[in-house]
Image: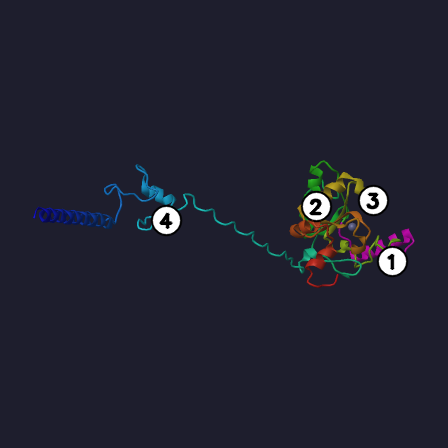
Amino acid sequence: MKNRVGRAIIGILALVLFGFYTYRQEQIHWHSADVESWGPATGLHPEGFEAGVDMNAEQQQAPVQMNFTTPEPAMPAVPEAPAELPEPTPEPLRFDMSDWKYMLVNGDHSIDQYEPENLVYLNMTADETDLQTSYNPNRIAVDARIAQPLLDMALGCKAAGLPVFLSSGYRSYSEQAANFTRICQNNGITDGKDANGHYITMPAGCSEHQTGLCCDITDRYREIKNDEIFQTETFRWLRDHCADYGFILRFPTGKEDITGVMNEGWHFRYVGLDAARYIMDHDLTLEEFWQQFGDGINV
Ligand SMILES: [Zn+2]
């Protein structure tokens, strides 16, 4: 009898203990399921939270993950640097070859009786900077469109402490015809070419001087222009700076077979700033420039 009472008491105690344990488990479950917001009041903090730090300010710099049920790694504090954009492909260079500045004249391309519309006259030593528009036999004539750049280049050379002499600009068809005859006679030739087959004087209609877009420039008056000019400081300055004024060295050494003309360290041709920079930077001649940009035009 005593044993039965004892077992009953143990059984009751076990039931009570089990019931209490179950109740506690339920309470814990309800409590955690109840958490839907965080903050100082709940004592729960999202990842990245620091006491005393303004979370709004923090969030502006780096968004913080707010999911409590499936915690994920914190977002990187420093946003990733944007991937470097590829260099934009440069537009292919184009030149409008119908532009007057690129007019091509050589032994194979005559301009026949062409005459510039407007000539202006520059002092040969560039001492006077006014551009005279009426005929003046003591000055050199050039196409009015290149007069100012030519004068600027001459003045730039003088400002560098070097002497400048503008020895020859525009020559008419008839003047070139007379030149050709005289030089041929002086050299015992008939075609204007030296022993290598390069022109030393151009037939009328084939000289660039007839365009008015070029000028022979030396350090001083020289009765004969020859290779000595390559040794002058004036030549070196002009070669190095002509493109800054829109001019090119028209008949460079080593390109005689392309231009058909003996090298001339004195003959500078205006082609405008963009073309001059391109031609001088790439060691080209006007003929090669035409081959590149002339769209199949045979030069
Ligand atoms: Zn010349």
Residue type indicated by callout 4: Glu
Disc 4 to disc 3, C-alpha distance: 81 Å
Q: Is residue 261 left or right of residue 277?
A: right
Front residue (pair 59, 297): 59
Tell me residue 13's x, y (percent). 13, 46
Disc 4 to disc 2, C-alpha distance: 67 Å
- Sequence-first disc among 1 and 3: 1
Circle 4 or circle 3, nearest the eye: 4
Q: Is residue 181 magenta?
A: yes
Question: Which label belongs to residue 242?
Answer: 2
Residue type indicated by callout 1: Asp
Disc 3 to disc 2, C-alpha distance: 19 Å
Question: Which label belongs to residue 227?
Answer: 3
- Sequence-first disc among 3 and 2: 3
**Which residue is rendered at x = 69% and y = 45% of the image?**
151
Residue at the left extreme, as displayed: 1
Disc 1 to disc 3, C-alpha distance: 22 Å
The residue at which mark 4 appears reads as: 72
Q: Is residue 12 left or right of residue 74?
A: left
Question: Which label belongs to residue 191?
Answer: 1
Circle 1 or circle 3, nearest the eye: 3
Residue type indicated by callout 2: Cys
